Image (tube, rainbow, N blue to C red):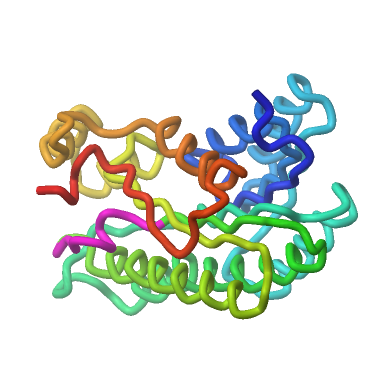
Amino acid sequence: MNRLEGKTALITGATKGIGKVTAELFASEGAKVVLCGRNENDGSNLAAGLNSKFPGSAAFCRLDVTDRKSWERTITFTKETFGELNIVINNAGISFRENLGEITDETWNKMIATNQTGVYYGMQFGIAAIAENGKPGAIVSTASVDGVVGDSNFFGYSATKAAVQSMTRCAALYCGEQGFQIRVNAVAPGYILTEMAEDDARQNGQTIDEYCSEFAKLHPIGRMGQATEVAEAYLFLASDAASFITGTTLMVDGGYVAK
């Protein structure tokens, strides 16, 4: 199937984890993908790999999601490379395991800048660029179960992910009011086995096996999620199959919030 044939998708945090798997899935479904991240080596290698499988499908653009000028350059690059923009996946994010007593201004501000301001820019620039086409489009952002139920050990992270859900609702209403054919949704993953999970395990002095055992117990389905399972949710919400869905958050959490 080519569920994204003829569409161009900009994906932030595309060089690893969920973003990388999403980029690979989108390219396999016919999309042109702009791979955005800060690591040029990883991004260029991923683009080369995708282009070898799906010729002309991918291009890397270095993007600092916290910087307005960087977004301006990336939108221009997207238009010059693929002609137009149809989909934005706001996936870039960072996390620190800190409760209210432990969190510092430094880590708080880092998470706000990446997880919240980065999504704000992605929505603002993405919606403006997609609206220029006069065609249907989609914005999908990464929220989290921690933004729904909260977690005392992820105070700042939970706050930023709750904000993503609120911004999603507001942006969806804005698009409707403006008459834009742009749907705005979010995906809230449970605990997913990615490089971010491995980093969190190291920060907490755990092996990855210990980490997986701890977090698997939090999901009624009995395990952590896989990046491919989240990528499929992005694909659905970005595709025409979700044409009547906007302003909502899709839980991909193995039953985490049902507890």
Where are the magenta residues, as a range?
A: 143-152
User: Measured along the vertical axis of the image, is residue 13 above or below residue 131?
Assistant: above
How many numbered circles does the render carry?
0
In the picture, measured across the screen, residue 102 lies left or right of residue 34, that is left
Which residue does the image show at 49% across and 55% down from the upper left?
Answer: 245
Name the residue furthest top.
53
Magenta: main secondary structure equals loop
Tell which of 97 and 128 is nearer to you: 128
241 inside magenta stretch: no
The residue located at (46%, 68%) in the rendering is 168
Please determine whether, in this image, residue 249 is positioned above or below residue 220: below
Q: Is residue 161 left or right of residue 5?
A: left
- Where in the figure is residue 198, as x and y percent of width and height? 33, 38
Residue at x-position 18% and y-position 51%: 257
Residue drawn at x 33%, y 79% as measured from the top left: 105
* Residue situated in front as seen by the camera: 195 or 215: 215
Place of residue 19 in the rendered image (x, y in percent of width and height, measured from the top left): 53, 42
In-front residue for pair 153/165: 165
Quarter of the figure with the N terminus: top right
- Is 149 covered by the magenta stretch? yes
Residue 209 horizontal side relative to residue 41, left or right: left
Q: Residue furthest front?
A: 244
Expressed as whole percent of the image width and height from the top left, the position of residue 164 reads: 41, 67
Q: Quadrant of residue 186?
A: bottom left
Quarter of the rendering containing residue 30? top right
